[in-house]
Structures are given as structure tokens and as C-alpha cells.
Amino acid sequence: MAGTGEIVTRVRFAPMSQSGTVETMIRIVANAPTYYEFIRTLRNDPRVQPGFLEVVRITTEQQNAYMAKLGGRYLVCLVDDVPAGYVGSIEGDIRVCTHPDFQGRGVGAAMIHAIMDLFPESYARLKPGNTSSRALFKACGFQRAGEIDGLHRYLRPSVDGVGD
């Protein structure tokens, strides 16, 4: 994210409602207070909550306090300038969420690659049944590296020496 403070990429995807492909501009930007409410609302969305390790309802006050402390370790993904997801690395643990309206467009992969560029030591902890996140991390080059406290741990081999 050198220079402009953002990563810009174009991806092609096939929307489920249309034939053919569409090109979409994805920008990964630094988290800022203007995105705190988007992140909180998405984190509280019942469509994505089952994928989180802990299902909780986050208040605005809780979100603002958390972001004041750790917001600098998060990035936000914009698709055609609309917030589409967020990713962070907290103590090396990747926290990622794509808004359901933007899933299947390369948003999750773009965010994982961006956070790994900033925090290459990061890893993922996944619930055993979280097939969507497992597919995302595998597509980004991660491999399962055991289990900790009932969660599957995924590491990126180029960084962690897994599978070498």
C-alpha cells in the first residue's frame, strides 16, 4: 500500500444473475473511522455470523473502543467505491469478512493477499465446518497445519515453511 495508501486491482467474475463476466474494480484501503460502522454492521449481520469463532452482538460503543485500539491492523475493501468487506490481523490471527452481496467476486482473496503483504506472519483459525473460509484460504495458498482448541489452523507455506 505504498504511495497512495491503497491497493487497486481489477477482477473479472461471472455474476450469478447474468451470463458472461463483469470487470470490477477492487480497492483495498486503510481502515478509518468512516468505516467503523460498516465493519460493525457487517460483523453483526446474521448471514455472516455463523462463520465467526465467536457469535456476539457488537454495540457502537464496543466497536469504537475496539477500533481505537486495533483499527490500524484492519483494511477495508471497496468494490466500485462501495464497502464490500474487511480484513485484519490481530496477534497474527486473520479476521476477514465479505459482505454477502459481494461474495464470489474475488473480494475475499484480494483482502487476504493484502493483509498478508502487511502482516506476512498471519494465519487463519477456522471452525471445522466453515467450508467457505476453508476454500478461500486454500485458494490463497494456505494449507491446514493442525488443530488448536478444536479449530483448524491454516498457514501460508511460503511464509511458514508448511509443506516444504
Image (tube, rainbow, N blue to C red):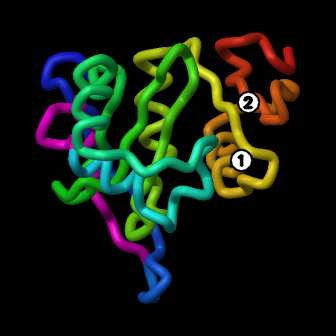
Q: At numbered mark 2, what does the secondary structure look like: helix, strand or loop?
A: strand
Q: Is residue 125 above or below residue 40?
A: above
Residue, disc 2: 154
Give yes or no for residue 81 being in the magenta stretch. no
Q: Is residue 116 left or right of residue 161?
A: left
Q: Earlier in the sequence, mark 1 or mark 2?
A: 1
Question: Which numbered disc covers residue 67?
Answer: none
Q: Amino acid at mark 1?
A: Arg
Q: Is residue 64 visible?
A: yes
- Identify the residue at image location x=82%, y=28%: 149
Q: Tag on residue 134?
A: 1
Q: Nearer the viewer, residue 60 or 8?
A: 60
| Residue range corresponding to the magenta coloring | 21-36
- Residue closest to the eye, 35 or 112: 35
Above or below for 24 versus 14: above
Residue 35 rendering spot, x and y as whole percentages: 19, 43
* Residue 98, image quadrant: bottom left
Q: Is residue 117 left or right of residue 122?
A: left
What amino acid is labelled 2 in the image?
Tyr
| Contact between labelled residues 2 and 1, with CB atoms less than 8 Å apart | yes
> Where does residue 4 sit, x and y in percent of width and height?
13, 25
Q: Secondary structure at mark 1?
A: helix
Horizontal arrangement in the rendering, residue 5 relative to residue 52 (left or right): left
Residue 128, horizontal then vertical, whole percent: 81, 47
